Amino acid sequence: MSLQNKVAIVTGGNSGIGQAIVLDLARQGAAGIVIDYVVHPEATVELEKEIVKLGGRAIGVDADVSKIEDLQKLVDAAVKNFGRLDIMVNNAGIETRTSVLDTTEDQYDKVLNINLKSAFFGTQVAARQMIKQGGGGRIINITSVHEDWPMPGNTAYCLSKGGMRMLTRTAGVELAPYNILVVGVGPGAVETPINLSTMHDPAKLQKLNSAIPLGRMARPEEIASVVAFLAGDGASYLTATSIFVDGGLMQSSVGL
């Protein structure tokens, strides 16, 4: 698999799953990577250095993906620095772990704006550039098993991921004539900062692991490798669908 001459944007790219995706795209030969971030610029600088060691090129861009103008800034940075855009990974996401009864308007707006609005308009601005330059492209939405599987007590998050499910399907159909493929990647439980409270609680962690047929959480690198595959030639007939990377969690009869 090779991503030689391909240019990518990864939102939320300086930590967790996003960081692993950035590194794997670099390992597969991506010509340039735009790393979106809003906090920890020092982590972005270190990530840029790692990519250089891998023989690649990268640039960090401080951009709030809940704002359309900032999403456009990411696309403009890709074109200015690397000449084009071939791969858009809508990865940025947050959660509040609040129920339908307890979620505030501010919490709802923040989750939907960062998770769903950013994916919608990230898809839009990326697709416009891909159509303008020709040759098609890949848009990969990092969703969750919770695009399909309810998680009581985390309602806004589930709603945002369910929206990403239909965005992936509908945009995949709309953009197919331009050879722009849109695929969702739905992780299960992953060893990232968003899950630290579970990882640091032995009882919660044991309960979670017992519900996963493979018996453990995923490593970020295991999600990233699927994204890199979807960005390459081997996935040239996949669009308007989701790939779940969950260790069998959605098929388990064990409740959480």
Image (spheres, rainbow, N blue to C red):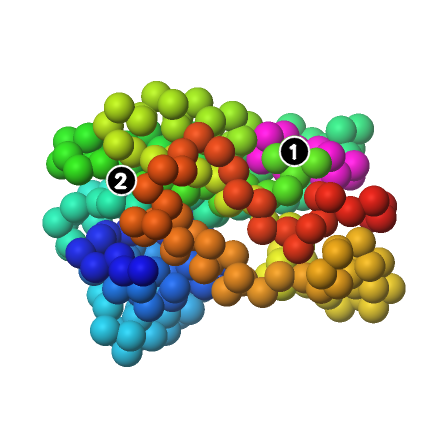
Q: Amino acid at mark 2?
A: Gly
The residue under the point 59% across, 30% down is 162
Judge whether residue 97 can be spotted in this image. no
The residue under the point 58% across, 35% down is 161
The residue under the point 32% across, 42% down is 236
Instruction: Write down the region rendered in magenta.
Output: 150-162
Contact flag, marks 2 and 1 (Cβ < 8 Å): no
Residue 98 relative to residue 176: left or right: right
* Mark nearer the N terminus (2 vs 1): 2
**Residue 18 percent coordinates (x, y):** 45, 56
Residue 205 relative to residue 78: left or right: right
Residue sitting nearer the eye, 113 or 78? 78
**Residue 110 percent coordinates (x, y):** 56, 36
The residue identified by callout 1 is 148
Residue 57 relative to residue 99: left or right: left
The residue identified by callout 2 is 137
Residue 45's label in the rendered image is none
Kindly state the secondary structure of the residue where label 1 is placed. loop
